Image (cartoon, coloured by chain):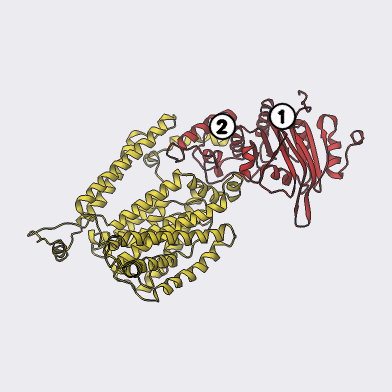
Amino acid sequence: MAETLDEPTRVQKRNFFAALELDTRLLGMIGAFIVLCLVFNVLTDGRFLTPRNIFNLTIQTVSVAIMATGMVFVIVTRNIDLSVGSLLATCSAIMAMTQTLIMPQWLGLGLEHPAIAPVAILVGLLSGMIIGAFHGWLIGYLTIPAFIVTLGGLFVWRNVAWHLTGGQTIGPLDQNFQLFGGINGTLGETWSWVFGALAVVASLYGLMSARRAKVRHDFPVKPMWAELTIGGIITAAILGFIWTLNSYQIPTRRLERMFEARGEVMPEGFTTGYGLPISVLVLIVVAIVMTVVAQRTRLGRYIFAFGGNPEAAQLSGIRTRALTVRVFMIVGALCAISAVVASARQTFHSNDIGTLDELRVIAAAVIGGTALAGGVGTIYGAILGALIMQSLQSGMAMVGVDAPYQNIVVGIVLVLAVYIDILYRKRTGS
Amino acid sequence: MTEIDRTGTPLIEMRNMAKAFGGIRAVDDVTVNLFPGEVVGVLGHNGAGKSVLMKMLSGALPRDSGDIYVNGQLAEIDNPRDARNYQIETIYQYLALADNLDAASNLFLGRELVTPMGLVDDAQMEAETRKIMGRLTPNFRRFNTPVAGLSGGQRQSVAISRAVYFNAKILIMDEPTAALGVEETRMVAELIDELKKQGIGIFLIDHDIHQVKALCDRASVMKNGKLVGTVEVDKVTEDDLLGMIILGKKPEHLAA
């Protein structure tokens, strides 16, 4: 019983970080991200870590990050989805046509009708889910490899989008729809603080109830100071993030126009910050829902079990083919949400929207620690992966690195990140 | 060892089971049964069809023809879920654990405990796992690591705990001791005796003649997909069993 013998020594070896019981891989990624930010900040003479740039970074990351959370499930179940960028384009095209042609003209509602944005989003979501479920059916029930199905989908949906719009740029999109794009829709300072406070309360409550559940069953818990430290870090991170976004001031010109639009006159010397973009709020909601699905639902448990051992999952009575359909349906829905964010951000649908996103999404998931062999991956890792990729790209752009060199660096970083991950896993034996 | 009462209704009766892969008859018109509190060894060379026969009972493989009776009632077993509904549990040698999940997740896989909100109740499942595994392997502590990091014996006890926890009436064990050390093998043997006393019927797939002699009440020997015969292990020698396995010949003193 070698396992039981070395148990006590391991307990003694516990140091400060061990007591916190944090995921060391996550710490490594956060560390790498911080180093990256600091280096770019020095290289850009402090322009990288300004509220304005951080705001831009977050809204640029959202679209890829949302899809990356779904890609985690796909890769965990030992599949791949090469069609997400094209599926995003088709969803975007369908939503653009719904809000500029079908509803205003065919249904005669006129432009800027309040029903347009919600109906368009609903139509987009349904389209994404149906197409995703169809992919899942081809893969799960007809047993065509996911690589082939989604490679086909990459061609098909890119050009379905082209067909639907006749290759034209469709815009401007509905004003309410544009609220999901980032800078055109933010919560403002007050509501951002309210959201931040709620987020802090919710996280602390989550920590507390997890501890209580452990105590109730007499499981070992971390020391109280460790819990408090983690609670403190989370609180600081959330409030710091809100503070940063609130510090990005809306330009005076723009403010004047906003007051004019409401038929008011701007008071002299009035300033306010943008606050939390609605698109980032969407990402946060997606991240929470996907994390709950991954960790606390049967569906999530089956996704990981299937990834770890497909045969075991099947012998345990899990309906593995239906599971594949569900996973791809989730990805389809997320592509639609990303399509809302991406098209709203540029305020129109364009023919090339989402081009090469499949590669960014896969890269984000993989940099975030999702193993292509299946069974391993986290939602927060994928989001952090997307953020690291985006920071790298915009940081290099700010430093003045030419586009081809940017892509060369991103490609090298992807391979290097996976290699470091392999070394890390070998060392920790996990 | 107490005599098994074989006058009543068998727990399991598999009649005229058949399964072919392409042109090869993996299982060809095989009939076996199992009574409460009995261990029936299923013996044969690799490829004799013993695993295929058992997989048809556990629902992992669909059968071509044949009927399965559970407690005398015709049973519909087309997939692993059906088998579980008849309280038939299977302990596979290598297949049935997801290496990336911890012991509790594996034990409850497919039958998770949920909170009133429908979310999986990990704390409750871990508590139950600690209870049941505490009985089987008191030294086990590694409840929060993926089972990939466990020893063969520990992995096996996760699989066995699963069957015990869900009140199996019929247990199929596929070479349960092949990957185990001496001490762990003894533990499994004790467990089998314990389960027998509770009236559970066990099909034991094994290569090891000594093991079969020690653990089983009867042995059904297969060769090339066909049943050579079923014998009470106390009435035959190890050589008799080997003759059945290798030559496909029933011992002369029982043949009549």
Three-letter code for the amino acid on which mark 1 is drawn: Pro
* Residue labelled with disc 1: B36
Q: Colour of chain B?
A: red
Q: Nearer the viewer, residue A311 or A325?
A: A325
Q: Nearer the viewer, residue B48 or A21?
A: B48
Q: Nearer the viewer, residue A134 or A52?
A: A134
Q: Position of residue A19 (x, y in %)?
A: 38, 38
Q: Which chain does yellow denote in the image?
A: A
Q: Position of residue B41 (x, y in %)?
A: 76, 36
Q: Are marks 1 and 2 in contact (CB under 8 Å)?
A: no
Q: Is residue B208 visible?
A: no
Q: Quadrant of residue A260?
A: bottom left
Q: Report helix, strand or loop for mark 1.
A: loop
Label 2: chain letter? B
Q: Nearer the viewer, residue A366 or A289?
A: A289
> Are the residues under badges 1 and 2 in a single subunit?
yes
* Residue labelled with disc 2: B133
Q: Position of residue B210 (x, y in %)?
A: 77, 34
Three-letter code for the amino acid on which mark 2 is drawn: Met
Q: Real-space Cα distance between discs 1 and 2? A: 25 Å
